[in-house]
Amino acid sequence: MFWDEKMEKLPRDEMVSFQEDHLKKMVSYAYENVDFYRQTFNDIGVHPGDINRIEDISRLPFTTKSDLRSHYPYGFCAVPPTDLVRMHASSGTTGKPTPVFHTKKDLEKWIHCMARNCYTAGIRQDDICQIAFKYTLFTGAFGHHMGVERIGAMIIPTSSGQTERQITMMCDFNTTVIHCTPSYAITIAEKMTEMGIGRNSLSLRLGIHGAEPMSEQLREGIEEKFGTIAIGDYGLTELGGPGVSIECPEKNGYHINEDYFYPEIIDPETLKQRPDGETGELVLTTLQKEAVPLIRYRTRDITSLEREKCDCGRTLVRHRSVLGRTDDMLIIRGVNFFPSQLESILLDSHEVSPHYSIHLTKEKMLDHVLVEIEPAPAYWASAADVTKSELKRKIENRLKDLIGLKIKIQLVAPYTIPRSEGKAQRIVDDRQA
Ligand code: DLL
């Protein structure tokens, strides 16, 4: 049941004392080895010796992505470059990538977190795992690869793309676990339909899907199309990649590897901590990193924490599904919402396929949203125009009920919206144009 039973089931008081001990060491280590931390601590008059209890973390300054950017490339490294054994970088397509580095020890700990996560999801030694995250600078494929390898299951490192070949390999080699983004899972499922391959031709039983939000509707769609249980995993390059947290089969929140990453939720405006159960921005502090220690890193991801014991027996704190990033939040005529909130409505209707695109424009100084959705091919081919108009109106009304804003829907022909092989690009922002 457990990869690392002692730590996964550690009583709360023991976890807190473990975290306090590691936080103290981490803060001194960062202060002594990273100029940025020495300077920011000195600026606000905090010395590592002032940090004794876990609550003292709130006295420390935050670290942001722009701090990392302004110290590109090696500014946050606490070790000489000769001690580094691996670099990865964020998947952003504009500007310089945000790099992360690993020492030999970091790599070993990352592997441990990923093995723990993959085991929690349900991977066992006799599984055949097809890794359909892209093998590049992106952390997704390498992280999953190393975790599965540690468990001793077989890996098929297909990477993402070449979807027909991907499916053929799943059939021929009896793949039991697929690792990919939720949106690529949908692309694969759609290609299977095109190829006339049903879920019964596959041996799949489990999917691990991360790197982007997966609404409950999207999860249900994936599970139904593949006949799998779909588990979400979460992480970010700056903290090393996947390996921060994962759902267990209870699907009741993501268990955080809190012996490696200390989580807080803050109000992104006031920067004050928020209590368990309240939604806000996730902030993470590395407790064991050697190459790039990060203190109070603002992930920009919106979620909440739950500390009640999970039915799986793990005591590790959980975060709820990430709603989205603060920088992806849309503010249209004063109403705030995340694309993932629209997704649950858009996918709630069997006439609609799970492909949509959100277009933002500016008209007469006001922001406008138009959501393009693709009806399912069979519906599109057979439904009368009047039925299609009704579907459009029905979805518009549901969206209005959910977010209190009239959002225009446009039905577009099947296969019009570009398919994802990694993280889906759902938003087209033409407001500057
Ligand atoms: O996406 C690492 C990863 C790879 C995680 C594979 C899980 C599986 P980045 O490219 O740096 O790293 O993007 C990190 O993606 O801050 C979130 O906004 C988003 N994200 C990652 N996992 C999830 C998830 C990888 N399960 C950013 N749900 C993060 C929602 C997620 N958003």
Image (cartoon, rainbow, N blue to C red):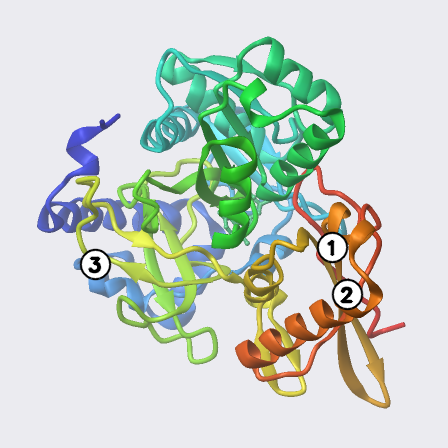
Residue 165 visible? yes
Residue 167 occupies quadrant: top right
- Dot 3 amino acid type: Ile
The residue at which mark 3 appears reads as 54
Would you say the residues marked 1 and 2 are in contact, meaning their CB atoms lie under 8 Å apart? yes
User: Horizontal placement of 296 versus 139: left or right?
Assistant: left
Q: In this view, does 304 lie above or below 95?
A: below
Q: In which quarter of the image is the C terminus?
A: bottom right
The residue at which mark 1 appears reads as 375
Residue at the image position 50 percent from the left and 18 percent from the top? 203
- Dot 1 amino acid type: Pro
Mark 3 neighbour class, 10 Å CA radius: few under 14, some 14 to 19, many 20 or more: some
Query: Which residue occupies the extreme bottom position in the image?
Result: 364
Could you say whether the residue bearing mark 2 is in a helix, strand or loop? helix
Residue 296 visible? no
Task: Report, in whole angstroms, how far the alpha carbon at label 1 lies from the one at label 2.
Answer: 9 Å
Residue at the image position 38 percent from the left and 71 percent from the top? 44
Between circles 1 and 2, the one closer to the viewer is: 2
Q: Is residue 398 above or below residue 251?
A: below
The residue at which mark 2 appears reads as 388
